[in-house]
Image (tube, rainbow, N blue to C red):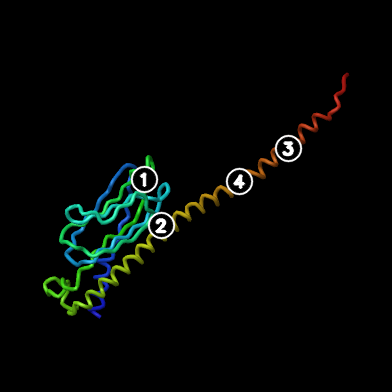
Amino acid sequence: MLSLILVVLVLLKSARCFIITVDAHETMCFYDHANFSDKVTISFEVMEGGFRDVGVAISGPADDPLHHSEQDTQGSFTFTAMKDGLYQLCFDNKMSTLTPKILMFQFHIARALEYYQDTSNRWDDVIEQATVQTMINELSSKLGAVKMEQEYMHFRYRGHLEVSDMVELRVLAWSIFGPMLLIIMTILEVYYLKHFFEVRRVV
């Protein structure tokens, strides 16, 4: 039971995603350290703003370019670190003149098997097999992707709910205003016709 709790804690600690807002003409960068042979997984999705596109740039230590795109709405990249050092993920909204972009992303690094063969690098003393730790890392990466998709769907649901409530309010307002306008016009027409056909007597 204790090992199960520790596995869940490891997964929750690793499966993290972030929601950020990138203003127009702004560039935001994020960094994480990876060792040689670590598996780096980066996924993102633009949730709101304009055409829902953003520029993406991924680079390794010494500014080695790994990926660059001008307009992406979503994407997922997995690669093996070839060097020790900081890996950089940048989002830019330079193509937009006024609209900020809201996006969600995950920057996950899974340690290589050799890393966990050193007992001093393990997070607990329950999981003794490095192969088990590797399986946990793979499961953590997949769990992070599922969690990210769930948060994105929840965000979209809230947006659709707001639009639905606004449409419902407008329909209700028009259903009240329309009959009232019709009644007022009917009364005015009756009043006008009554005075139009009225016979005036001259004494």
Kindly state the secondary structure of the residue where label 4 is placed. helix
Q: Nearer the viewer, mark 1 or mark 2?
A: 1
Q: Which mark is residue 100?
A: 1
Q: Which amino acid type is marked by label 1?
A: Pro
Q: Label 4 neighbourhood size at 10 Å, few (<14), some (14-19), many (20+)? A: few
In the rendered structure, which disc, 4 or 2, sits on the residue that comes first in sequence? 2
Does the CB distance between marks 4 and 3 fall below 8 Å?
Answer: no
Q: Quadrant of residue 184?
A: top right
Location of the N terminus by quadrant is bottom left
| Residue nearest the observer in this picture, 42 or 165 | 42
Determine which residue is flagged by label 4.
Answer: 174
Q: Which mark is residue 187?
A: 3
Q: Label 2 neighbourhood size at 10 Å, few (<14), some (14-19), many (20+)? A: some
Image spot of residue 161 (x, y percent):
48, 55
Determine which residue is flagged by label 2.
Answer: 155
Q: Disc 4 versus disc 2: distance between alpha carbons?
A: 29 Å
Location of the C terminus by quadrant is top right
Q: Disc 4 versus disc 3: distance between alpha carbons?
A: 20 Å
Kindly state the secondary structure of the residue where label 3 is placed. helix
Q: Where 64 sits versus 78, above or below?
A: above
Q: Which amino acid type is marked by label 2?
A: Phe
Q: Disc 4 versus disc 1: distance between alpha carbons?
A: 33 Å
Q: Which amino acid type is marked by label 4?
A: Trp
Residue drawn at (29%, 68%) of the image: 141
Q: Nearer the viewer, mark 3 or mark 2?
A: 2
The answer to whether 109 appears left or right of 174 in the picture is: left
